[in-house]
Image (cartoon, rainbow, N blue to C red):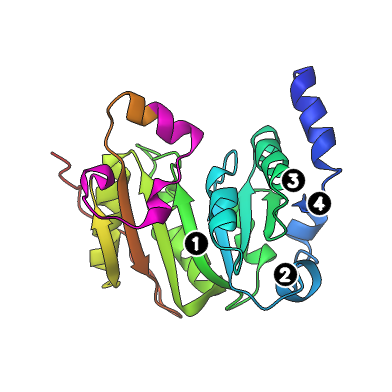
């Protein structure tokens, strides 16, 4: 492991808004902040929004800056990437931001039922050959629905047309409420300003003239999400 990564890992531990659950907290008991994010960390009753696979935290910090009346938590396994989000939150004096370094698979250990209002999934690995590992697969939707409020929403922003249309198929198969979708958001004459936040990878995709897609949809509580059985035509 490079010295720069080790330096960033060590620096992460100095931030009060950085959380790195131990294996014991993941496998033997819930994380100590579960159900207490509002009362013990943010110390307010504002809605909690999480970004899964947050990378460098551009969306987590960008949203936090735009919406100071909401709380934002980014989750990613890559500590060197989270380091950038922590630095940004400090540089901009954002008090409504936190980061968790861990796997998304353990998300139900971090949050209790109805604790989260909204979820963002920004430019995840589309897992071209492993649908089960996609962050909008039924496996993950089941986990998200456990922690989301009854009217909680999921946002997917991606350059992957495969992931975009796969997610639309999952929404249709499970009769979910699709609030909005676009297969080319920057072609829209009018769009929500939250879509203009750009991540490191998004800037690279745009430079290559790759279209950016977006979907916003609601999940169903206490529902067994079904997989998409048929192959999807992405042509």
* Residue named by callout 2: 37
Front label number (3 vs 2): 3
Q: Within the magenta stretch, is there residue 187?
A: yes
Quarter that holds the N terminus: top right
Q: Are marks 1 and 4 in contact (CB under 8 Å)?
A: no
Labels 3 and 2: the sequence-earlier one? 2
Instruction: Check disc 2 and report its element: helix, strand or loop.
Output: helix
For the record, the magenta segment spans: 184-204
Q: Which mark is residue 90?
A: 3
| Cα gap from disc 3 to disc 4, whole angstroms | 24 Å
Instruction: Check disc 3 and report its element: helix, strand or loop.
Output: helix
| Cα gap from disc 1 to disc 3, whole angstroms | 23 Å
Labels 2 and 4: the sequence-earlier one? 4
* Residue named by callout 4: 22
| Cα gap from disc 3 to disc 2, whole angstroms | 19 Å
Q: Position of residue 200 (x, y in %)?
A: 50, 33
| Cα gap from disc 1 to disc 4, whole angstroms | 24 Å
């Amino acid at each position: 492991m490079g010295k720069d990564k080790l330096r960033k890992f060590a620096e992460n531990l100095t931030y009060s808004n950085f959380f790195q659950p131990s294996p014991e907290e993941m496998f033997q008991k819930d994380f100590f902040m579960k159900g207490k994010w509002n009362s013990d960390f943010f110390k307010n009753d504002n809605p909690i929004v999480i970004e899964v696979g947050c990378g460098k935290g551009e969306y987590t910090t960008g949203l936090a800056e735009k919406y100071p009346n909401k709380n934002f938590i980014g989750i990613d396994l890559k500590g060197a990437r989270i380091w950038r989000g922590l630095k940004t939150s400090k540089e901009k004096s954002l008090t409504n931001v936190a980061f968790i370094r861990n796997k998304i698979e353990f998300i139900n250990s971090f949050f209790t039922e109805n604790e989260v209002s909204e979820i963002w999934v920004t430019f995840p690995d589309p897992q071209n050959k492993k649908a089960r590992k996609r962050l909008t697969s039924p496996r993950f939707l089941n986990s998200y629905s456990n922690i989301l409020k009854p009217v909680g929403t999921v946002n997917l922003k991606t350059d992957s047309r495969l992931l975009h249309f796969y997610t639309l198929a999952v929404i249709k198969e499970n009769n979910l409420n699709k609030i909005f979708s676009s297969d080319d958001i920057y072609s829209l004459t009018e769009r929500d300003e939250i879509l203009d936040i750009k991540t490191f990878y998004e800037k690279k995709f745009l430079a290559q003239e790759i279209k950016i897609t977006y979907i916003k949809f609601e999940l169903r509580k206490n529902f067994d999400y079904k997989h998409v059985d048929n192959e999807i035509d992405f042509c």
